[in-house]
Image (cartoon, grey):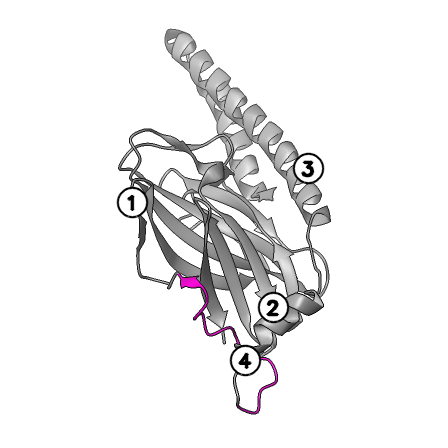
Amino acid sequence: MKIQSGSLWLAAAMLAVTVAGCSSGSAGAGRELTEKLKAEISELKKENKVLKEENEALKKDLVVRPVTAKEEGGTAELLSTGDSPAAADSGEDHKLIVKGTPLTVDGTGEYTITKTSFSKIVNPSNPGSYYTYYEAKEPGTTYLAITLRMKNLAGQAINAGGVADVEVTYDNKYVYSTFATMEKNGGEEFTYTNISTIGPLKHGTLVFLTEIPDEVKSSGKPLYADFEIEGETYRYIIKK
């Protein structure tokens, strides 16, 4: 996750102009604005450092594993009888979540997948003057980003970090863990899910990310994501 460098430059320039342009009659207001800008820049630098550390740690936790023989056998029963040796799971043995269609869990929330994308760089949906973003730096990789909009139907605020756990499976055997970030200020920037809450009857937009090989994007092989929500698993089929 990085901070747009041009925005830091702009913030610094604004700070310089503010200091130089304050008259003696408005010194108090100028000092207040200067201190506010300093605080914002300092906080942004701290957040960037923490986000970089967290992102590197999450990369190390990326899981890629083959399914066991038992799992493989269970999947084989769901494969297409056509020419393809590895068709996507039909979903007959799984509850499904479909992009654009709200999934309601009584007393908990309404969940809607609004977007799925493959991109080297993932930006917030409505970037502000300065913002954080994710970039897949390893050669030959890209980010798979799944955007989930959640409406809280519980009677109290919930922690955004507990909305869902998501795991992505490619070719019915390669499994990738994900991590989540949350949009704030109308999609102007990203923030941590574990320090964010969603109030009763309010919405939160989360983006689940996993860094995958380019092969996963370009291949015609099956790709799906399993969402664990309140102890139940819902399958989102990305590519059959």
Q: Amino acid at mark 2?
A: Tyr
Q: In the displayed structure, would residue 93 be above or below residue 52?
A: below
Q: Nearer the viewer, residue 112 or 108?
A: 108
The secondary element bearing badge 1 is classed as loop
Reading the image, the residue beneath label 3 is 53
Distance Cα–Cα, label 2 vs label 4: 14 Å
User: Disc 1 residue type?
Assistant: Asp
Is 51 on the left or on the right of 208, as rendered?
right
**Residue 129 visible in rendering:** no
Q: CA distance from mark 2 to mark 3?
A: 27 Å
Q: Is residue 85 magenta?
A: yes
**Badge 3, how many Cα within 10 Å: few under 14, some, many 20+?**
few
| Residue identified by numbered label 4 | 79
Per the model, the C-alpha gap separating discs 4 and 3 is 41 Å
Q: Is residue 19 left or right of residue 100?
A: right
Disc sitting over residue 168 in the figure:
none
Other residues around mark 4 within 10 Å, as few (<14) / some (14–19) / many (≥20): some
Total marks shown come to 4
Q: Secondary structure at mark 2?
A: strand
